[in-house]
Amino acid sequence: MASVYLDKVYKQFGATAVLDGIDLEIADGEFVVLVGPSGCGKSTLLNIVAGLETLSGGHVRIGDRIVDDVPPKDRNIAMVFQSYSLYPTKTVRDNILFGMVTRRIPEHKQQQALARVTELLHIEQLLQRKPGQLSGGQRQRVAMGRALVREPDVFLFDEPLSNLDAKLRVEMRTEIKKLHARLGQTTIYVTHDQVEAMTLASRIAVMDNGRIRQFAAPEIVYEQPADLFVAGFMGSPAMNLVSARVVQDSGIWLQVEDASGNVRLAVPAGSATSIGAHIGRHLKLGLRPEIITRQGTQKPSEFLCTFKRPVDVVEPTGPDTMIVFDLGGVEMIARVHPEDRAPIGSLYSFEVNMDKAKLFDPDSGKRI
């Protein structure tokens, strides 16, 4: 096992900067997930750690070694690609053991490793098949098996579950987490799936346009987003973001100006001093869908504010129902219990827990 340290890592393709001075320190044994929209640079960053892309600037250290110019084969890493990258003429067994054979690992250790990973990945029955005889999900599991039989310093995963069906993705996600808990291997995992990021990571690096917007534990990224980008990206459904003006009238209020009538939401007393410095300004108010519910369903609190709006869309999801409504010209989503659903077009009484509301500076995007 080893730590990974990235020091002002730059990557350019021609005149285009893909990575813009990435600083990242990953502790020995940590499971770090790189998450962000397509094109943000997360896979490029992973490839630089692996040695598959050259640096335009900065340094990469794995353990005690600077590996800027070290070939991938000498970095002692194991990587699972988004594509399968299997040898088409070799069987599943030979694909999984190929690296161990070339490193002249004793036969009995090869068999032990093979038995362990094939049971883990549920591919015992596939060992004599070739990649052309496998489904996409089966091929990806074989690719994962090839990485898992090694004993690398660092595991690198580039969206390894993207080709699996929904049920198997959940199972494999659980198995990957169990594997990390058991082995404690340093792991860097790339995904665009927020559920994977939240459930797997010890820390999440949220990336955008070649930069890291926030690097923190999953619960901090979710509950205390650093800026508007993180707030809008993390969460499914995403955080509701609406413009609100700070007003003073027997207290500090956030007023959402709406065609159906302005909505005033009270600022908790503990936040009044800091928010009071912005009286008269329009700020971005962030409300997670789960803190907006039907009136009367939350535990009574001084932080609860109520308002009414017509129901535009109802989206049942099973354990929850999403109610879509308009507030301040913005399409908002409330997460309610299925029994609290209402007909489309009906006037619905909402309540919101303002103690969990977030405020952002619309100019800088930073959380206040």
Image: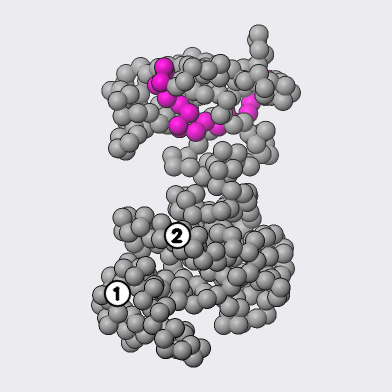
Point out the stretch of residues depicted in magenta. Answer: 280-297
**Residue at (56% x, 38% y) in the render:** 223
The residue under label 2 is which amino acid type? Lys
Where does the image place residue 46, in percent across and percent down from the top left?
A: 56, 67
Q: Mark 2 points at which residue?
A: 178
Q: Which residue is drawn at 63% across and 69% down?
A: 2
Horizontal and vertical percent position of residue 168: 32, 59
Query: Regarding mark 2 in the picture, which secondary structure is present there?
Result: helix
- Displayed quadrant of residue 366: top right
- Crowd tier of the residue under label 2, counting other residues whose Cα lies within 10 Å: few below 14, some 14–19, many 20 or above: few
Amino acid beneath label 1:
Glu
Residue 216: image location, x then y, percent: 62, 49
- Secondary element at tag 1: helix
Q: Residue drawn at (39%, 72%), measured in percent from left and top?
A: 117
Q: Is 95 or 135 nearer to us in this picture?
A: 95
The N terminus lies in quadrant: bottom right
User: Any mark on residue 160, and which?
Assistant: none
Nearer to me, 35 or 199: 199
Alpha carbon separation for disc pair 2 and 1:
19 Å
Q: In which quarter of the image is residue 265?
A: top right
User: Which quadrant is home to the C terminus?
Assistant: top right
Residue labelled with disc 1 = 124
Q: Does the magenta stretch include residue 291?
A: yes
The location of residue 327, given as percent across then percent down, is 47, 24
From the viewer's perspective, is residue 41 above or below residue 272?
A: below
Residue 117 sits inside the magenta stretch: no
Q: Is the residue 95 above or below the residue 40 in the image?
A: below
Q: Which residue is drawn at 41% across and 17% down?
A: 296
Q: Can see residue 124? A: yes
User: On the image, which quarter does residue 129 sit in?
Assistant: bottom left
Can residue 41 be seen here? The reply is no
